[in-house]
Amino acid sequence: MEHRFIVVSEQESHFAQLNEALQSIGVAVWLHWNTDVLSQLVGSLGTNIVFVEFSDQNSQKAAELTSSLLAVYPRLWIVGFAPRAENALIIEAMRSGARDFVELQAPREAIRRSVQHVLEQSPTRPAKSTGEMITLLGARPGVGTTTAAVHLALLLKQEVMPSEPVLLLDFGYPSGDAALYLDTKVGFNFCDAVRSLRRFDHALLNTAFAHHKSGLAILSLPQNLADLRDISPADAMTLLSLFKSYFKVVVVDLGGFAGVDLLMYALGISERILMVSEQTLPSVFSARQLLHNLREREFETERIGLLTGKYDARIDMAPLQIAQNLQIPWVDNLPQRTDKMIACANQGKSLSEVAPKDPYLEVLRGLLGNYRHPAASPAAGVPHPASLFRRLLTPLLK
Ligand SMILES: Nc1ncnc2c1ncn2[C@@H]1O[C@H](COP(=O)(O)OP(=O)(O)O)[C@@H](O)[C@H]1O
Ligand SMILES: [Mg+2]
């Protein structure tokens, strides 16, 4: 099971250091001090360990936080941390109830080992269902990223896991396209959700979030993108992580999304990342640029799979060549379906409604394990959707 950690610190760089060390073990969420969302998050994330920073200036505050968290969750394991482990800080942390102490300047491997050690000893909590995040990037606007994200999310909700909550995060640019393609009005947007972080629960999700008639939840960016500047980046990141505990799958359309920090965070917590590129030079050029920027930020771009958009076998640029050029693995080709797509757009319907057997959908079904819900296609011996889904995602899991 993937572990979830909460890191309490004022310093984003300290969170980043710890997060890097923890990456192979689980997902870490960064929170500021004294936030009232903390104890709520401990419960809803099914957190194993909370890391609390102890520094000379704040050790008393840190000790109080530790004691108050332990008063609510006596079985929680709190680990103190500091850039340098000074004896006074360690003693303060242990006195307040922390079980261990990590020094940030220690080698990452040492941090990882001590966290593993804590995990081995910590009481097992009831397993929480862990959601998956599938993120789609686009080489440039117009290549078909939103269309792919919308249909991937729809197929998941309608065919793979009808009784599970699935969320489509409509973060692409031009903004609001996913909601438009699904003919769904989104009144409550991502900034509203971030501002509601402290009272986030199933009730809010059911009442405030927009839902397509299939039951798929949709959350878009605000119409005025400048509103994004008013929300706390840490809260936005926390919310993204929180979505993974509320939804079985979160599909994120990040085609053209410009907020670099949030984009990097979303990629970091995604189980699967696909990039859509057309078979044209400008598209491949833009894709290269995007991948270059990600590599500069030390993102492992080999985790990104190539989906050829609007694929046409007559075009003299083979998808495998494109993948080779971009140095990312090729995943599949989304066939060019211009007439069908125009028909969908003009009727305000999805391709699943207009042409459920369309080859475009068959490719996406293939990505999701070509699984049909037993009700739709009663095949014997079909594995459980969740396990099949997980298995199919495994090759690209971190
Ligand atoms: N496979 C396809 N074949 C033909 N047209 C497509 C295909 N995928 C998307 N389109 C069309 O291309 C246009 C841009 O698609 P969209 O998904 O909005 O791209 P993006 O999100 O990358 O900007 C839309 O008019 C859409 O209907
Ligand atoms: Mg788009």
Image (cartoon, helix red, strand yellow):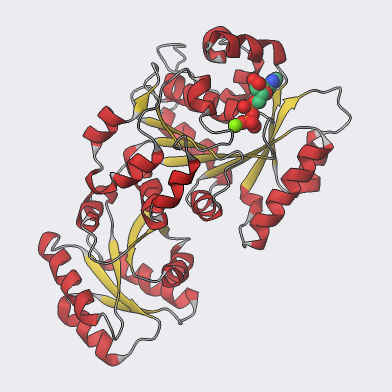
Q: From what the image shows, is residue 242 above or below residue 142?
A: below
Whole-percent x, y for residue 67 in the image: 14, 71
How many numbered discs, if any? Answer: 0
Q: Residue furthest bottom?
A: 87
Whole-percent x, y for residue 241 in the image: 38, 49
Q: From what the image shows, is residue 156 above or below residue 250?
A: above
Horizontal relation, residue 315 to residue 186: left or right: right
Q: Residue furthest left?
A: 71
Residue sitting at x 82%, y 23%: 313
Is residue 130 in view from this perspective?
Answer: no
Whole-percent x, y for residue 46 in the image: 27, 51
Q: From what the image shows, is residue 209 above or below residue 354?
A: below
- The quadrant holding residue 19 is bottom left
Residue sitting at x 39%, y 86%: 84
- The quadrant holding residue 340 is top right
Residue nearer the viewer, 267 or 121: 267
Is residue 355 in view from this perspective?
Answer: yes
Quarter of the rendered image showing ligand 1: top right
Q: Residue furthest right?
A: 316
Residue sitting at x 49%, y 79%: 107
Whole-percent x, y for residue 26 in the image: 41, 57
Residue sitting at x 39%, y 57%: 234
Horizontal relation, residue 199 to residue 390: left or right: left
